[in-house]
Structure formats: structure tokens, C-alpha cells
Image (cartoon, rainbow, N blue to C red):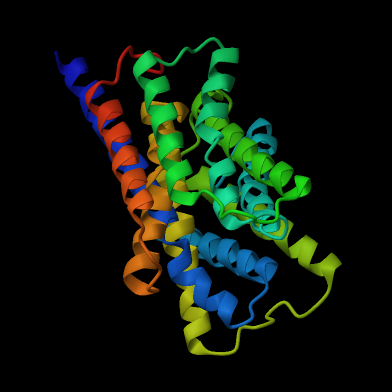
Amino acid sequence: MAQGVDIKKRRLAGYLAGFIAGVSYGTNPLFAKPLLESGVPVLVMLLFRYGISAAILAIWMLAKREQFRVKGNEIALLVLLGILFACSSLFLFFSYEFIPSGLATTLVYLYPVFVALIMVFLRFYPSWQTWLSIIATFGGILLLSSPSTGASIRIPGIILAVASALSYAFYLVIVNRSKRIKNVSEHTLTLYALLTGAFLFAAIRTLQGGSITEGINTASDWGNLIGLAIVPTMISLLTLAVSSRYIGPTKTSILGVFEPLTAILIGTLLFGEPLTMKMGIGVAVCISAVAFMVLRPGRKVYE
């Protein structure tokens, strides 16, 4: 009886963490848009985003006297996770140069499908309820972010957006299924991922050339960088790890639908962006699909 209660609490915590991960990641426009308007290059933004987030998390862990040390056989996998998560961000931003952001968003949201297919390859089969939720949420995303007629679409952009989705999918699956990092805490796992991303962006920026603080001129710019580091980065990564471990990567990826929903809400309320009837229907479809998944979870295939 106690074990059954623990499983229910774990599942509830996983759903809640997945929701927080989606909502927090969806706040990206709140901090990133003012920075882009100030002329901060994408690589500079990503470098400080990951670097500040890693510093804050490290200070928190020091204050709590948490463990930083990991075993030798865990380091390579933690670095790989950092590269995968960083590449997910990098590929998405680069795809904007070739295709409309709406199409990029739609293609990136293929990641729940990729997660489910990878899990099938590993012989963990999602229930029909989960597959139905994936299809419904993807349909909702199509309504939310379909590109306008006549938009320029180039193959490299499609490849980059799909690569972003694949990177994110592999990150979620490895966090959930790898026995090698099973005993690594979410805080330690997230710290190493952030540090890896920061070093990667610093290396690329060095090769690219230009000032490391280009476009960062005011206290407001630094405030937005700190906000970007805390909310859609550190909080999102921490809760993402918890959710993936508690309810599995497939259901966690479906809860990621709250990313574009939050971004749309912020755009509508704060930046005056239009909310059309088609987008409203898309929001309703996405929320209904998530509610169905939570209320009808199907077979316990990941626990």
C-alpha cells in the first residue's frame, strides 16, 4: 500500500516538474527578445545564459554542501548530455536564418515523436494513450505555428530544426535510461550540462571573433541575462531531469507543449502579438491532449 502511494506521489511530482519545465522554458522571449533588440549576438547570449546559470547553481550547491564530485566513468556521459542540450539551442537559433520561426518551432516539436521511437527501439513501448497525446499535441503545434503562405523555406533550416529536436530527444532518453548516471543528483547533472554548454559556446564565439560582451551595455541587459539564466535555463533543466526520471522521457516531452503555449501567452500579453482563432484552437487541442495523458496514463511502461 505504501509503495503504491509512493508511486502515485512520484508520478504527480513528475507531471508537476514537467509542467514547470515547459512553462519556465517558454519564458525565453521575455528575456531574450529585449537582448536581441539591444544587439546582443545569439552566441554571446547563450554563453552568458549557461555561464551565469552554472555559477548560480554551483553557489547554491556549495551553500547546501552538495556533492560536486562524479566518478570517472560518469564524466564523459555528463559532457555528452551538455553537448546535446547546448546543440539543441544552437541548432534552433541557426535554423531561424533559413526558415520561418513558426516552421522551426513545429519541426522542433517532433522531439516527442523521436523520444517515443527511441524508446521503442530500446523496447519500452508507450501506451496508445501516449501516442494519441503525441499526435494531438503535434497537431495543436501545427495550428499554433504554421508558417505564412509564400514563406521562404530552405533545406539547411529544416535539417537544423530536426537536428535540434533529435538532440533534445536523446538528452531526455539518456537522463531517464542511463544506469551509469542513475545515482548522479539532478543538481550535479544539470551543473555539468551547463558548464559543458558554456565552454562550447565560448569556444565557438572565440573562433567566430568579436567581443565577448558585445551588445551588453546596460543594467537592464545584465538583468535580462540573469533572468534568462535562472528561469528558462537552470529551473527548466533541473525540473526536466526530475520529470524525465519520474515519469519517463516520452511523457515529459509531451508536457514540453507548455513551452510554446507560454511563449504565445507572453507574446500576446506583453509584446502585443496577435492571437488568432486558429491559434486559440491549437491551444485548446494541446491542453486537451495533455489533460488526456495525465488522466488516462495507460500502462506503466517506464516505472
Query: Which image quadrant for residue 296?
Result: top left
Q: Is residue 183 above or below residue 160?
A: above
Q: Nearer the viewer, residue 218 or 281?
A: 281
Look at the image and tell me in which quarter the N terminus lies: top left
The outermost residue toward the left is 1
Q: Is residue 238 above or below residue 32?
A: above
Residue 297 in the image: state x and y as whole percent.
Answer: 29, 21
Q: Would residue 131 appear left or right of 212 to someone viewing this image?
A: left
Could you tell me which residue is drawn at 48 percent across and 42 percent down? 142
Q: Residue furthest front?
A: 150
Left or right: where 207 falls relative to 125: right
Q: Identify the residue at image location x=40%, y=66%.
A: 267
Q: Is any part of residue 61 visible from this angle?
A: no
> Does residue 283 appear in the picture of this structure?
yes
Place of residue 50 in the rendered image (x, y in percent of width and height, measured from the top left): 58, 61
Residue 69: % across, % down: 57, 44
x 33%, y 12%: residue: 299
Q: Is residue 216 left or right of residue 290?
A: right
Q: Residue at x 30, y 15 (%)?
A: 298
Number of numbered discs visible in the structure rendering: 0
